[in-house]
Amino acid sequence: MVPVDYYIVLSAILFSVGALGVLSRRNPLIIFMSIELMLNSANLAFVAFASVYKTFSGQIFVFFVIAVAAAEVAVGLALIVEIFKTKKNINIDEMNSLKG
Amino acid sequence: MSSDLIVFLVLSLVAIATALGMLFSKNAVYSALFLVLNFVTVAIFYLLLGAPFIAMAQITVYAGAIMVLFLFVIMLLGAESLAPANSLPWQKPLAILLSIILAVEATYLLFNRAGTGMAVVAPDASVNTMESLREMALALFNQFLLPFEVTSILLLVAMMGAIVLTRQEKGAAQ
């Protein structure tokens, strides 16, 4: 018997670590991974509450979040590859204009 | 201390350690591998919470497909270790301070305001039967049919977007 609060606290900690990654790292690939970590921590909270309230809605929402994350990664990584081809490096500080 | 709680504490230690390892690795390939381990740990949490279908989807989609895509791009670009930019020296301490404040605040609020006191009961064998999967599929295709269809359009658009973005311009190819 684990209180559901523990799962929510773990989810909050993982979310904070992901936020720290977005704020402090300069490699856009690591920033992307941190965003995945944040999505994952939200999923954990969803499944924890779905399990406590004995409903499938939370699990189905997690299913949708996974699909959205996959779509986001496909487009985001294509963008990063394209930026690398144009600028020859992917330092996030140099991405300050939309024009290629 | 019950065995459930011990399993939870050990796994959450692994989850937090791998998340921090992802964050502080110098090499992006190591970061990706740490993140795979983190996703597998979260999948085990899903199993503990009685959601085997989501756990398997987590492993196939996240740890399998998405992280392989990440590793491909990291190795394709040779972006394993970027030279650290030394602009804004105060940014890192400030980011650490802000995220610690975020974690403490969220934990405080969750324990004091939203504390439900409800406990996660260990799932019995019924979650592993076909009947449980059938109930979930019925909910997905009746109650959530519209979001499901919208998701398929979203995936189609993302696929087209990725193709358009990486396509060679005509004339530039030669």
Image: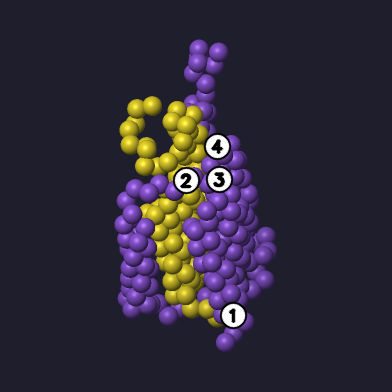
Disc 2 to disc 1, C-alpha distance: 41 Å
Label 3 resides on the chain identified as: B
Label 4 resides on the chain identified as: B
| Tag 3 and tag 1 share a subunit | yes
Looking at the rendered structure, the secondary structure element under dot 3 is loop
| Tag 2 and tag 4 share a subunit | yes
Q: Is residue B112 above or below residue B74?
A: below
Q: Name the residue furthest bottom.
A: B1
Label 2 resides on the chain identified as: B
Question: Which chain is rendered purple in the image?
Answer: B
Instruction: Please tell me which of labels 2 and 4 falls first in the chain.
Output: 4
For disc 4, the neighbor class at 10 Å (few under 14, some 14 to 19, many from 20) is some
- Residue A66's spot in the image, x, y percent? 52, 50
| Residue designated by label 4 | B77
Q: Is residue B130 above or below residue A54?
A: above
| Residue designated by label 1 | B6
| Tag 2 and tag 1 share a subunit | yes
Question: Which chain is rendered yellow in the image?
Answer: A
- Residue B107's spot in the image, x, y percent? 38, 73
Q: Nearer the viewer, residue A78 or B116?
A: A78
